[in-house]
Image (spheres, rainbow, N blue to C red):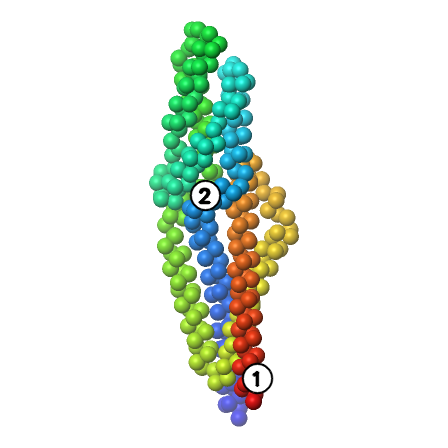
Amino acid sequence: MKKLFKKLSLKKVLYAVLTFILALCLIFGSLITILRITFFNGSFLSDTLNSSQYYNDLCVEIAENLSDLGDASGLDKSFFEGFVSEVLVRDDVQSYITDFYEGNPLKVNTSNFDESLQNALKKYIKTNHIKNVNDESLEYFSAKASRIYSNSIKIKYFSAVQDIIVNNTGLLTSLIVVLALISAAICVILIVTNAWKHKALRYIYTALSSAGLFLLILPICVFASGVIGHIAIMSRSLSDMYISILSTVLSDMIVISIVLIVVAVAVWVIHTRVRKKSAV
């Protein structure tokens, strides 16, 4: 009798451990999947920037910085009004993002900006009948304006994580597959080794619901705390970008958690029906 009791107790412990491991696999698999389709996906970043105020805010910031340079150089304040094209900024940022995810050197091609600036300067000099232009001063001004534009296009902190993103994208995909296989294997073990199938289903829906609740509570707490809205990173455009990214990631967590909870409820319904049949 004691041996049978110990055997049953040991079996329950093993099933509890397997249920816990299954829940962990579901949680980590979900989090890694979110990382893979967000931070490790260039299309996600492009779509996020397109749907946010990033480009508009960035154009305003570039124009303000160039206006300050123009004031210091004695140019009329109207020189840089409407000078920064959102289309140009968008194209250059998209090229920067492409280089980032392809592992290319993060350099900004300012040739289009430089050409527009030179044309604007020539027109300004001709319109205002300015003579005896100092070529060195003009070259210095152009180089500084180009540097301001280039530094603005570069997305801060991206150069520090480029190698991590590029070198580990494949690893994340492999981890997702491995965790999915482990989860499937645990489910099979629970079902095959349990004479009463409704008990196996109970372990499975417990793991599903636990993982779903964890993934649901975390983003809700973050949203409720309001901490995202207080992110301030150097400039308004960067703050808006990172707020949009984090909000999307947390929203994805909520979506996946709801899916897990719905599947858990479905498994619970099946478990209830199977238990009733077993009792007959």
Q: Is residue 230 left or right of residue 146?
A: right
Residue type marked 1: Lys
Residue 276 - label: 1
Q: Secondary structure at mark 1?
A: helix
Residue type marked 2: Ser
Mark 2, Cα crowd under 10 Å, few <14 / some 14-19 / many 20+, is: some
Name which residue lies at 44% across and 36% down.
93
Residue 39 image position (x, y, % from top left): 46, 49
Name which residue lies at 44% across and 18% down.
120
- List the single residue furthest toward the bottom: 1
Name which residue lies at 38% across and 34% down.
107
Q: Secondary structure at mark 2?
A: helix
Which residue is under mark 2? 46
**Residue 145 visible to the viewer:** yes
Mark 1, Cα crowd under 10 Å, few <14 / some 14-19 / many 20+, is: few
Total numbered badges shown on the rendered structure? 2
Residue 213 image position (x, y, % from top left): 58, 64
Residue 235 image position (x, y, % from top left): 55, 35
